[in-house]
Image (cartoon, rainbow, N blue to C red):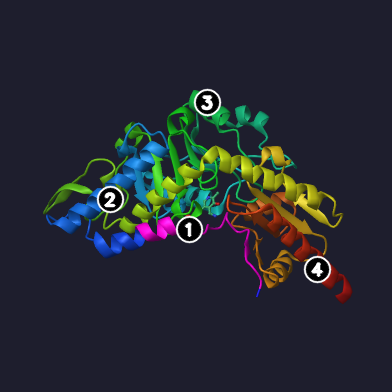
Amino acid sequence: GCPLVYFDNAATTQRPRQVIEAITETYEMHYGNVHRGIHRLADETTELYENARQRIAQFLNAKSHEEIVFTSGATAGINLVARAWGDAYVQEGDEILVSELEHHSNLVPWFQLAERTGAVIRYIPITDEGLLAREQLERLLSPRTKLVAITAVSNVLGTIVPLTEIIAAAHATGALVLVDAAQSVPHRKTDGQSLNADFLVFSGHKMLGPSGVGVLYGKREILESMPPFMGGGSMIREVRMDGFIPGDLPYRFEAGTPPIVPAIGMKAAIDYLERVGLERIDQYERELVKRLHQELETLDFVRILGPKPEEKSGIVSFVVERIHAHDIAQLLDHVGVAVRAGHHCAMPLHKRLGVTASVRASFYFYNLPEEIERLLEGLDRAVRLFRRRK
Ligand code: PMP
């Protein structure tokens, strides 16, 4: 009964008509399987799918489309690296360095790798403001560090991580770097070559695209050195009775029928985002963050988590004194404001901050400043209701 305010963009975004039309048109007019058929529909689909890969390579300023592997999402990309690279190169006593900001998707695959290999997981701590304690980095990096797996932007605090510095320091000690860019690629310009990460992952559904598709971007020489993770059709050059020869990049990591139409939809999403302009998107969302911060800071019963707005991308998480985050989210939902409540797949981070759950408002460029007022009105109602009940 009231207009929707959608502030759950860190979980997933809404898609524009152009993306939906690209998907529908593919299914209606150009749909076959890729890389297989010698018929027109299969050729058309293959061309659209490979165009999507080229477009993503260009979007990320990758050196080549061979560095772009389609996955089912950021989580799948991290698991692919943990399995294919990790099982081949990580041994007992080696160290994987993560941070206290990480999403479970960038923790659990490394725990699992540690279980398989005897590797050790170490953490770059954060400050009480939710910034990475950079001065600890030198102490933590050593020749034992095989990989630094780190988020670009915290999905809870919005903290922007100083990647350039971390990547340079990691490379200086011989470690590789995986960047979990699920919360940054959709909002901020990413230049793969100047960033110089070895692996970078993200998901289509958080950037106006369909669910079920994501990208693992990896440096060609490193991807080439990795055995395939999943086996099946399309990832081989040759199969004999007694074995197989893996295919070339990027196909050796795309076993089976890939997320064809979602990848094509993701291209349409990128076209849309680039028309709007990522610099503009970033700037605009930061204005929204500043505004919400200013308002929340006037409420003595609210604790904002994380750093100052200047250090944040478009995410604001907070806790309300004596009211559980789920209750706040539910009451906000009654007035049409969608936020997320809980641990946001970052339980260790919440523990570090001394809370079990938080309310998260996460923005995208289609959100409006007036919508922040709706959130604040809803919050005010919720607090008054709870105070009356006590
Ligand atoms: N990393 C971060 C920082 C995220 O925010 C998310 C999604 N919440 C993921 C990884 C996982 O993304 P997906 O579920 O699309 O694989």
Name above or below for residue 190 compared with residue 272.
above
**Which stretch appears magenta?**
2-22
Name above or below for residue 228 compared with residue 340.
above
Question: Which residue is depicted at the point 58% across and 51% down?
Answer: 364
Numbered circle sitting on residue 381:
4
Numbered circle sitting on residue 48:
2
Numbered circle sitting on residue 282:
none
Q: Main secondary structure of the magenta part?
A: loop
* Residue 44 at x, y percent in the picture: 21, 53
Question: Which residue is depicted at the point 28% across and 50% down?
Answer: 48
Marks 1 and 4, Cα distance to the nearest angstrom? 30 Å
Image quarter where the C terminus lies is bottom right
* Residue 168 at x, y percent in the picture: 52, 26
Q: Amino acid at mark 4?
A: Arg
Marks 2 and 4, Cα distance to the nearest angstrom? 50 Å
Cβ of mark 2 under 8 A from ligand 1: no
